[in-house]
């Protein structure tokens, strides 16, 4: 694994993610069943444009999303308090020197773990607590982090101040990860072709 330690949200971090598929968007490439997603082409066109312009396309953030980002450090501190583990903050992780795809976990833990934090609204957090499992909306992202980092597990944490945090340890789903890797390889080959074609126009 190759690690870029540019702080998340910084210009260096954005530059490290330009033109490559990242785990937070793996759901646009593959469904939870490991099948190709109908969103793949649009995402591919976005990444091709980023490669040519050299700029990361800005994504929409509502008030809840902004609040969630601002609370990540508080959530990390709570995780360390609850588990006794130390969280190492990183920028972008790549599986190897080719840097064909990557992920930005909210931390690495020792040699075997990673952390993914979400800070949803109170109602959503309570729903997560009641279900007590990894929310399906983040399945591809978390499994994608396991593919990229080759870690033993990812601890998914949902946090809301004043309420009990939810921490779910997620192991690799080998069957899904095999499908994800296959789709990523195909996606990146087509992304190269599309990018070259645009340059020739």
Image (spheres, grey):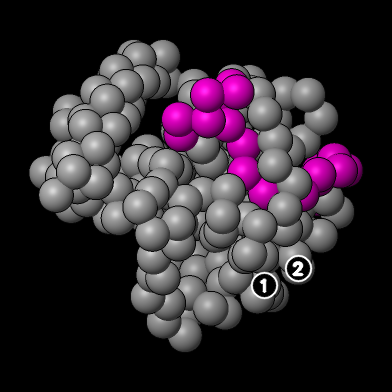
Image coordinates for residue 58, horizontal then vertical, percent: 41, 70
State the residue position of label 2.
74
Q: Are marks 2 and 1 in contact (CB under 8 Å)?
A: yes
Q: What secondary structure is the magenta-colored segment mainly?
A: loop
Magenta residues?
Answer: 82-101
Q: Residues within 10 Å of mark 1 (few under 14, many from 20)?
A: some
What is the x, y in percent for residue 106? Answer: 65, 50
Residue at 53 percent across and 41 percent down: it is: 103
Instruction: Measure the C-alpha gap from mark 2 to mark 1.
Output: 5 Å
Q: Circle 2: is it few (<14), some (14-19), or many (20+) Cα within 10 Å?
A: few
Point out residue 182 in the picture as x, y percentages from the top left corner: 29, 18
Q: Which disc, if any, is residue 71?
A: 1
Q: Quadrant of the N terminus?
A: top right
Q: Is residue 100 left or right of residue 13?
A: left
**Which quadrant of the figure has residue 196?**
top left
11, 39: nearer the viewer: 11
- Say which quarter of the image contains residue 29: top left
Residue 85 lies within the magenta run: yes
Q: Is residue 61 left or right of residue 162?
A: left
């Amino acid at each position: 694994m190759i690690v870029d330690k540019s702080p998340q949200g910084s210009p260096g971090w954005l530059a490290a993610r330009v033109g490559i598929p990242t785990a937070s968007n793996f759901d646009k490439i593959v469904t939870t069943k490991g099948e190709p997603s109908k969103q793949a082409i649009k995402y591919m066109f976005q990444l091709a444009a980023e490669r040519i312009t050299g700029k990361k396309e800005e994504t929409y953030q509502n008030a809840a999303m902004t609040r969630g980002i601002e609370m990540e450090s508080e959530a990390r501190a709570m995780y360390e308090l609850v588990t006794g583990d130390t969280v190492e903050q990183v920028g972008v992780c790549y599986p190897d020197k080719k840097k064909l795809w990557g992920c930005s976990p909210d931390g690495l833990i020792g040699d075997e773990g990673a952390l993914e934090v979400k800070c949803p609204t109170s109602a959503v957090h309570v729903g997560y607590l009641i279900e007590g499992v990894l929310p399906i909306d983040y399945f591809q992202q978390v499994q994608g982090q396991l593919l990229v980092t080759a870690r033993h597990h990812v601890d998914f944490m949902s946090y809301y101040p004043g309420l009990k945090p939810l921490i779910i340890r997620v192991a690799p789903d080998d069957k899904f990860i095999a499908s994800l890797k296959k789709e990523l390889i195909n996606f990146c080959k087509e992304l190269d072709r599309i990018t070259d074609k645009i340059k020739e126009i």
